[in-house]
Amino acid sequence: MTAINDYESVIGLEVHVQLDTASKIFCGCPTVFGTEPNRNSCPVCLGMPGSLPVLNERVLELGIRVGHALDCQISERVKFDRKNYFYPDLPKAYQISQYDMPVNGPGFLTIELKDADGQMIERKIRILRAHLEEDAGKLLHEGIEGATLVDYNRAGIPLLEIVSEPDLRSADEAYAYLISLKAILQYLEVSDCNMEEGSLRCDANVSVRKKGETRLGTKAEIKNLNSFKAVHKSIQYEIERQVNLVENQEKVIQETRLWNDVKGQTFTMRSKEEAHDYRYFPEPDLVPFTISNEMKEKLRSTLPELPRQRSKRFQEKFGLSAYDAAVLVQEKMTADYFEECLKAGVPAKLTSNWLQSELMALLNEKKTTLKKSPVGPAALAGLVSLIDKQTISGKIAKDVLPIMFETGKSAEAIVKEKGLVQVTDTKQIEEVVERVIAANPKSVEDFRSGKTQALSFLVGQIMKETKGKANPQLANQILEQKLK
């Protein structure tokens, strides 16, 4: 193992977001996923001679909304450029993108993550730009032996490429950045962010340098990252690979590398092209244009409450910790579900705990999502209410939740049907406590001789005899009184 702690990693991310529009960026072809290959194509997105692109206004509006949410400078003057390169999935042999006059200039994204002491901290990550461009097609290496097929349905799909400055310093920070960015995009409703369908793609630029140095090291770009976990693992691997090279006096080569999730390592794809190799020049079929201040402000006014704003509200209004609030707002659906639960008047902290732990664990076990959960907000609120009123214990509630999931019945109905109401009758619990004390003299002696862990054993015996129905706090209190 090399002295990896002597090095600092420098990471920048390029995130390609498919904007949620009905038609492509420069033509009227639909953007529906899963259509028969090459069905969603026309002379414009195939680059046929004589065809002319026309900018989809909705694409521009969505791009500006993202720019506002990322505190970007929205450009007044905008143009498109041709990025020239040859690849089979690029029908025109160039991609219409933006080079020196992007729609969104510098901005920033504030991320939250835990430090070494477990405290939540904030880091401001600078955004270099967020520009519009069209997607390329897709190569298919299956179907005909020895042949590669091309599907141009994605050619012309509208993308917003969000480029960060190299401000990230670890795989954890990169992961937090992506989680935060995805949340913002979901709240804005500009993209479904479905990585499996290619709606959100990420490339990572990684380099290392000795701590204290200011000069950037040679970077490698990692592609083929199809999940946030893959981004995290590939960055961590690449950091270790580069540190090993430097420690062994070997050269880090500037190149594009692919991530192999099965092997857990990156490997060389090709040497890295520089920007001038693309021979950018202004797109002659799309004239430069001006974005009016009126349009900018109109779009700014449509911004919803964003994740960080919602997180602060959850802390101030509901008394949640910074960590709990941050977790809840990561997915808009989760935060919406939480607030729906609270409409029933249940305690926020208890609801947050049950949503984040028990319900999410059950959804993972059943391999489903909150959107498809048979336990809706009102149902979970009903369960939390029974716990809060001490009608049932938390232990019994953990048995009730799966039954709710399977049957669709309310917590109250299940508790009545199975006779699970918590025992809070002092006299009844006292009788059980006395029986447990009489049946376990060794544990009683251990407790009285200072072995406090014996108390937990005795409480467990009480809960066992009452089949989990005894109020744990009351049982504990009565037991201590009897023992003393």
Image (tube, rainbow, N blue to C red):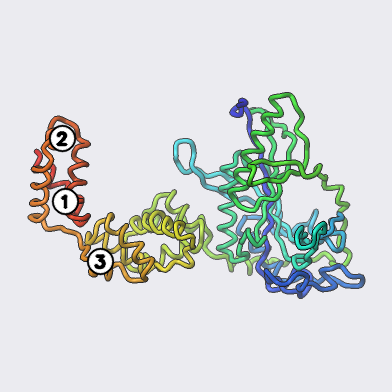
For the residues labelled 2 and 3, say whether their Cβ atoms are less than 8 Å apart: no
Instruction: Identify residue type, mark 3.
Output: Val
Distance between the alpha carbons at the discs numbered 1 and 3 = 20 Å
| Residue 356 location (% of width, % of height) | 41, 55
| Residue 423 location (% of width, % of height) | 16, 58
Name the residue that disc number 1 marks: 474
Question: What residue is rendered at 62% in x and 55% in y?
Answer: 71
| Image side of residue 291 versus residue 65, left or right | right
Earlier sequence position, callout 2 versus callout 3? 3
Question: What residue is rendered at 75% in x and 27% in y?
Answer: 250
| Residue 299 location (% of width, % of height) | 63, 67
| Residue 37 location (% of width, % of height) | 75, 69
* Nearer to us in this view, 284 or 270: 270
Secondary structure of the residue carrying numbered label 1:
helix
Residue 148 quadrant? bottom right
* Nearer to us in this view, 82 or 108: 82
Distance between the alpha carbons at the discs numbered 2 and 3 = 35 Å
On residue 447, the disc is 2
Q: Is residue 349 above or below residue 272?
A: below
Q: Is residue 468 above or below residue 375?
A: above
- Label 1 or label 3, whichever lies nearer to me, is 3
On residue 323, the disc is none
Name the residue that disc number 3 marks: 415
Secondary structure of the residue carrying numbered label 2:
helix
| Image side of residue 221 versus residue 432, left or right | right
Instruction: Identify residue type, mark 2.
Output: Phe
Q: Does residue 357 appear in the picture of this structure?
A: yes
For the residues labelled 2 and 1, say whether their Cβ atoms are less than 8 Å apart: no
Earlier sequence position, callout 1 versus callout 3? 3
Distance between the alpha carbons at the discs numbered 2 and 1 = 19 Å
